[in-house]
Amino acid sequence: MIRAEFTKFRSVRGWVLGLATAVALFVGMGWLTAAGSFTSCDDQACPSPPVGPEGQAVEDHFGFAHRTLTGDGSLTARVRDFSGIITYPPPNHDEIVDGLVPWAKAGLIVKSDINPGSPYAAIMLTADHGVRFQHNYVHDAAGPVDARWLRISRSGADVTAYASADGRNWTTVGTMSGWSGPVRIGFAIASPPDITAKGNPMGGSIVQARFTQASAVFDQITSTAGGAWRYDEVGADGLRTDWEKLHRAPGMTTGSDTLTLTGSGDIAPATDMRVAPYLAGALPALLAILVVAVLFITSEFRRGLIRTTLLASPHRARMLAAKAAVIGGVTFAAALIAVVVARPLVSHVFRANGNFAAPTGLLTDLRLSLGTAALLAATAVCAYALGALLRRGLLAIVLAVALTVVPYLLATASVLPVAAGEWLLRLTPAAGFAVQQAFPAYEQVFHPYTPADGYFPLAPAAGLAVTCLWAAGLLTLATVRLNRADI
């Protein structure tokens, strides 16, 4: 049956041309998007963000007081005071206030060198999330909530972090392995921007970010690394806000038994990143695919050819399943060809225009490519099943677009409030677009993870499963109707 249906599909020139059009739209729209994206910094190439040891683009900007540690050793200190300022926060945006953003952090760190993106392990006191052990930007583990004493030690290839509420009873918070050679050990201070997102009356949200700065006083310091403390502002770009110029600039001061650090920035995965837009053509390609998928079945009903098909294949359920396998299979193959062609072409054009394409890793690249092909295939089966259920081409096409394309546009174009858009991407076949989320949402970074920013409410596999469930459900309804109704 599958062979017969595939022969039927490739013998109809319009259906084959429809899939070819989908491939052309996929590649062409990706190329147009890349060709229209330009980034420049005073007529020169913009600096790329640092890339961490695990291949992700990262944010690595913080105040660092450090010494060189050539072998085993440790550093212990208490965070005696932790304070900061937030510039012009809501509701009135008219003054600078005292306070810390939730993920402001101060603590002890071991870092391979002072270059942004280099490996590190840190035990940090945060403003609202207690003590955290963080390493290599993407890893985060919670420690004791009430601890103010911190210790970090190196033994061979291992760096271990501890926390204590009283300086006597210590809890091991985490260990990072793989260290070799001399490292920098010391104190770190960071304060990310104050970010707020409020609803837009026209839909979506308005995101604002404001400069913040934190200060920490460390005392009860015990260090096995000798020498004077040296201060560096890691990842500094040389720019200063007006507030910094007139007030507290980042830096270090030392007392008889204290060390005070003041600084801004963050040590975390980067969130405002883009991949090359080689998947931008998936939506226009989907429109062509929906039309082909619906006509693949409704044309037989319209012309009465379904009777001939059932004479050759009397088992109605198997006939519908065979046609679903064919339309899903040819769509998957066409979409995969489109991705394979679009990815290098679009990536080259995107980078040639001065844009930075954040690295995603081999497994993520495979998931984006295969997942997008699977999404288009599952959506094609949804449209085909609607055609078999309704037997009216135009009505089925309109409904297929309403169930897949419209929810995605409403959610990602900020037409609806964020919560409403996320529910659409949980409940409709458009949930499968979650396979195109390139970067994970990190708990240790406050960011408005919304569909408009490329973040979806369901995990990639879960979103694709929702689309497949819709396809299976609609195909089941179509089978029930075909078995019960006359042709």
Image: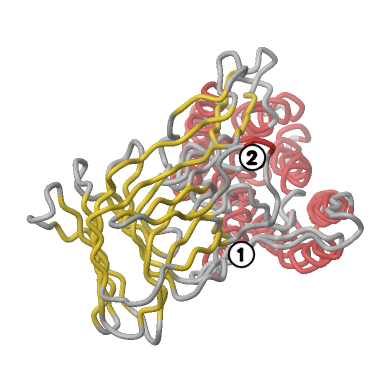
SS label for mark 2: helix
Q: Left or right: 401 with respect to 166?
A: right
Q: Nearer the viewer, residue 315 or 334?
A: 334
The Cα–Cα distance between marks 2 and 1, rounded to whole angstroms, is: 46 Å
Q: Could you tell me which quadrant the C terminus lies in?
A: top right
- Find out whether the residues at labels 2 and 1 contact each other: C-beta distance under 8 Å: no
Three-letter code, disc 1? Pro
Q: Quadrant of residue 392?
A: top right
Residue 288 in percent (x, y) is at 78, 43
Residue positioned 71% across, 35% down in the render: 298
Residue at the spot x=47%, y=49% of the render? 190
**Residue 324 appears in view:** no
Residue sticking out furthest to the front:
256
Q: Alpha-carbon neighbours of circle 2 within 10 Å: few (<14), some, or many (≥20)?
A: many
Give the labeled residue for mark 2.
Answer: 384
Image quarter of the N terminus: bottom right
Left or right of 223 on screen, residue 235: right
- Judged left or right of residue 102, residue 368 is right
104 and 368: which is toward the camera: 104
x, y (%) of residue 333?
67, 62
Camera-nearest residue between 448 and 61: 61
Q: Residue at x 88, y 49 (%)?
A: 36
Where residue 242 sits: x, y (%)? 69, 37
Give the image location of residue 226, x and y in percent. 33, 77
Q: Which residue is mark 1?
A: 50
Callout 2, which amino acid? Tyr
Residue 302 lies, with reference to residue 63, above or below; the image says above
Give neighbour class at mark 1: few <14, some 14-19, many 20+ (Cα, 10 Å). some
Residue in the picture at 79% in, 51% down? 22
Asked which secondary structure carries label 1, the reply is loop
Instruction: Specify whether 136 is left or right of 220.
Output: right
Q: Earlier in the sequence, mark 2 or mark 1?
A: 1
